[in-house]
Amino acid sequence: MSEISPWISVGALGDAFAPDNNALPMVSDLAGKTLTLNFQNGWSIEYGFRDGGKLNWRGTAGEMLGSNGQETYTVTRPRPGIYFVDFIKAAERATSVSMVFDLNRGIFTALIGQLPTFEQANESFLKKIAANKTLTGVSGQFLSGAIDRPFAAATARHALTDELLGKRIYYTYSPTEKYEHIYLNQNLYSWQCLTGCEQGLGDTDLCHYYKIDDSLYWFVWREKIVPTLGVVMVDLLNLKTTGKIFGYAANDFGAASNFAVGAYAQVICDLRA
């Protein structure tokens, strides 16, 4: 029987994933562009993408009016006209923003994720159950909208999907790091580490699925044992993923670790086929 690895911090996980990884290369396609995102909830935010991975933003309508900031962003392109944009909000505690820009249709979906405080993460599962809370302390707010045009009732949106349900997929992140996912239902998936720094570990965690394009999905998970937010785009046409993992660098609930990931995908079976 293989030995089970100990639970590690997200920072240590990032260190293990870094060598010879299968992440998509960063692209500079957005550098020099200014895009206005008009959210369904009435927000309007102007994003100015600069060289060197710098991003200036300012709120121009809704609750964001008058707010502004500068961030350091990353961007990958899983398919032509579709981008995964990600950054940590410099002025907020343990908060990241991940966005899918669908320039082909002029729409986007955004996720604002926040890690729990020490007190939130250490609240017992029984107390959370009694209070009707999710077992994970990682929060996630999904928002949709239009790019460079007003959001209207007829504006298309990336919709929740059940197309991944029942699939069992192996993901190879690097020569040493390999995981298995089984997508159980609209709210839960199971994972285990087959080889690598978490070998033998696994769990069933809260998750979310959005369809971006044909055979292209935005998969988000929120872990409950080690507070972790995973955000990846799963391309089952090209059998490749791109995304990020966000959590605390160490178990002291101090600095955050936000690192890019990507994997080659192998569909083992589809239990609903």
Image: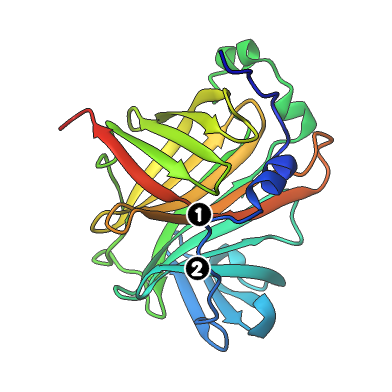
The color scheme shown is rainbow
Q: Position of residue 103 (x, y in %)?
A: 36, 75
Secondary structure of the residue carrying tag 1 is loop
Q: Nearer the viewer, mark 2 or mark 1?
A: 1
The amino acid pointed to by label 1 is Gly
According to the picture, the residue beneath numbered tag 2 turns out to be 76
Quarter where residue 11 is shown: top right
Quarter where residue 91 is shown: bottom right
User: Which residue is at a point 65% across and 85% down the rendered structure image?
Assistant: 51
Q: Position of residue 33 (x, y in %)?
A: 53, 86
Q: Would residue 214 appear left or right of 6 to someone viewing this image?
A: left
Secondary structure of the residue carrying tag 2 is strand
* Of residues 195 and 76, the one drawn nearer to the viewer in this rendering: 195
- Assess disc 2: are there few (<14), some (14-19) or many (≥20) residues with their C-alpha within 10 Å of its C-alpha: many
Q: Position of residue 147 (x, y in %)?
A: 41, 75
Q: How many marks?
A: 2
Please say if the residues under marks 2 and 1 sit with CB atoms less than 8 Å apart. yes
- Assess disc 1: are there few (<14), some (14-19) or many (≥20) residues with their C-alpha within 10 Å of its C-alpha: many
The amino acid pointed to by label 2 is Thr
The Cα atoms of the two marked residues, 2 and 1, are separated by: 10 Å
* Of residues 109 and 251, the one drawn nearer to the viewer in this rendering: 251
According to the picture, the residue beneath numbered tag 1 turns out to be 262
